Amino acid sequence: YGDEIGMGDNIYLGDRNGVRTPMQWTPDRNAGFSRADPQRLYLPPVMDPVYGYESVNVEAQLRSPSSLLHWTRRLIATRRKYKAFGRGTLAFLEPGNRKVLAFLREYEDEAMLCVANLSRVPQAVELDISRFAGRVPVELVGQEPFPPVGKLPYLITLPGHGFMAFRLATDAKPPGWHEERLATRRLPVLVLAPGWQETLDRGSPDIDFTQVFMHVSSARLRDEILLPYLKGRRWFAAKNEPIEDLRVASIAPWKGESGNTWRIAFVDAKLASGETQRYFIPTALDWETRDHDPLEKYAPFVIAKVRHRDRVGIFYAAFANPQFARDLALAMGSGAKAPLGAGRMSFSATGRFAAFAGALDEPSRTPSLEQSNTAVFFGSKLFLKGYRHLRVGVNPELELGRFLTETSPFANIAPVLGAVEYLEPGAAEPTTLAILQQFVENQGDLWTLTCQHLSHPLHLPAADSAAAAPEATAESAVAGFHLGRMGLLGKRIAEMHRALCVTTGDARFDPEPVTQDDLAKWKEGIERELDATLATVESILPRLAEAARAEVEPVMSARERIRERIRSASAKLDGLVKTRYHGDLHLGQVLVAQDDFIIVDFEGEPGRCIAERRAKSSVLRDVAGMLRSFSYAAHAAMLRREPGADASGAGAEPLAQWERDASRHFLAGYITAAQGLASMPHDQASFTALVDLFLLEKALYELRYEIANRPDWVGIPARGLVGLAR
């Protein structure tokens, strides 16, 4: 009847002839329904100016991805994917807002929530779906995850006559922006001993906590307070490893310019492997009053409840208090130095600090959503990053940031304004605790934006070959996304490498010639990584899911071909230099700022030690990292559409083509902008050989990472390695 294109009826024809008019296929004569003369048709086509065949027809709607026809096809394809809609139970919910219809469809392990607004105006509804607490609602058409279901009523808002359908998933993660604002564990209660403050303020490295807390042994402090708190933090790198011991290495007071006293703790985690990891944990104490509930204010950051005589309060992470970050930043501006236990805290600022000092008075915000570091924002002007997992030595992000801010300026970074460092007794170099940067207004990171755009066209069902216009296909929708801008991305990265190739007299940054010995060491290191990676794969292979095992086994078979590719890599090194480089470059490290890109996060690969991250090498390691990121984006778009999606299934070829085109545009932009750059090989063969070598290195690193963190993603680096082996 044409309902799927919204063609309407000719109500003036009488009887039921209004729904017997010709189907509107095209804007041509008789709507493409017949080649006969119009007067010979049994019934006339609809010629209404709004719903007539010249404006509403299949051909036009196939050309528009947002048309009613494509919407209907997506809806039918989505419904067919889930058995619960046809075979499951149906249970209507009874929300307080009766203008909203809500029901559940369940079949075996599938649970679907459908919500429809029957009103012409926007409505909100609270649904009692607490029996699904912990599940993540995933919107069915766009596959967008929503915040997880909790014990409280679930709030949903809908536009007029709007509807949404969700899969209540057990295998999906909450959206990255979701912040958990409630206490996630039962908090222990510590009773403060008489004289606790004097004991803490002495700042002794071997503090006796029985003089701080009553009835607390070191074992209880470790097992009931420190370990549960740290295992709930995203920045605690040892959460999945056996821990032999956990101890407070030192805790000492530091008084900020606000007059507040903050207690800076360093906690050592000794792992079963023999490695010891150190963590930076600044703390603060807040007391409850009649008008002030600190637990409500700092819930996600609380370490423990405390009691002293008739007072009750909390120990919490000091970064949650805006004044702590402000005190750090103010001390940077004054270049202060402060004793901290047996060591010393040193504050410094770059020449740009003074221009932004006024922004410290703006309201600050600490997201409760933690990453590998802790972030504090001062309005939309400044960004303070606190490092939690510490390594001895200057953090590459601070070192490179200072260099690209002051010594060899590069415009497309977030400039460094200041830093906090800690020097332990006997240490040759300080440890970086925090840096202050200029906040750059942006539209998000390039990884997120790319994955979102590549995922959406995949929800278009394959167009009928006889009727579909080329513009309607998923191939054309994917192919054009961001390709021109990938050339600009290559140009910006080349400009960054040019800024890092300047000779300034600073031995840490001055370019050095690449020798055959350097190339041999790079190849030996990558070969060691090959053996280590495949040993890890071998040990975990029996425990992998069948689909993941099928992806990884070809890598084992290609071991010798990969080794041969590594050993046979050769390049002309005359005039080639090695310099500092980003070290962990991928789409997630690039912010989209208006029509340009900002490169951020110069820490380097988190799995490598500080010395490796600070070492000079070939800048083509950055190029290889970005090329691997294009591959990740293409594969992640498939997984975003449907967990466990077949890499060779429908929609895979246009994404593979996008990856090839994106890589080509990126390399063209990079090579053009890097002409004459001493850190880039001058002949194409050497350039290709080195990029391929570092692609193997990056894919091996990725495979180890995915095995440890996301086994369902092992297919992405595995397929990359097999492809490179060929």
Image (cartoon, rainbow, N blue to C red):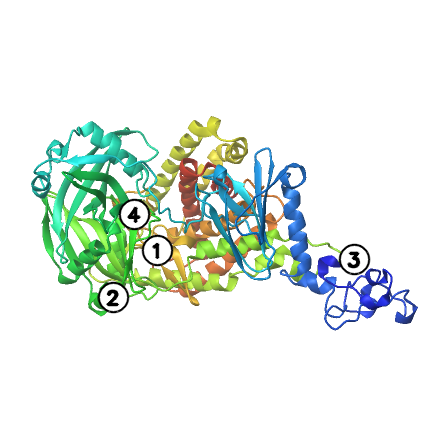
Q: Residue at x 41, y 51 (%)?
A: 177
For discs 3 and 4, the disc positioned in front in the rendered view:
4
When asked about the image quadrant of residue 268, the answer is top left
Q: Name the residue under label 2.
A: 359
Q: Mark 3 points at which residue?
A: 1
Q: Do the residues labelled 1 and 3 touch (CB within 8 Å)?
A: no
Which SS class for mark 1?
A: loop
Q: Earlier in the sequence, mark 3 or mark 2?
A: 3
- Local packing at callout 1 (Cα closer than 10 Å; few below 14, some 14-19, many 20+) is few
Q: Is residue 230 above or below residue 160?
A: above
Tag 4: amino acid: Glu
Q: Earlier in the sequence, mark 3 or mark 4?
A: 3
Residue 613 visible here: no
For discs 4 and 1, the disc positioned in front in the rendered view:
4
Q: Which residue is drawn at 59% across and 48% down?
A: 652
Q: Are marks 3 and 2 in contact (CB under 8 Å)?
A: no
When asked about the image quadrant of residue 196, the answer is top left
Tag 2: amino acid: Ala
Tag 1: amino acid: Asp
- Left or right, residue 620 beside residue 221: right
- Left or right, residue 362 beside residue 39: left
Q: How far is mark 4 from mark 2, CA to CA?
A: 28 Å
Q: Is residue 647 above or below residue 3?
A: above
Q: Which of marks 2 and 1 is nearer the N terminus?
A: 2
Q: Which of marks 4 and 1 is nearer the N terminus?
A: 4
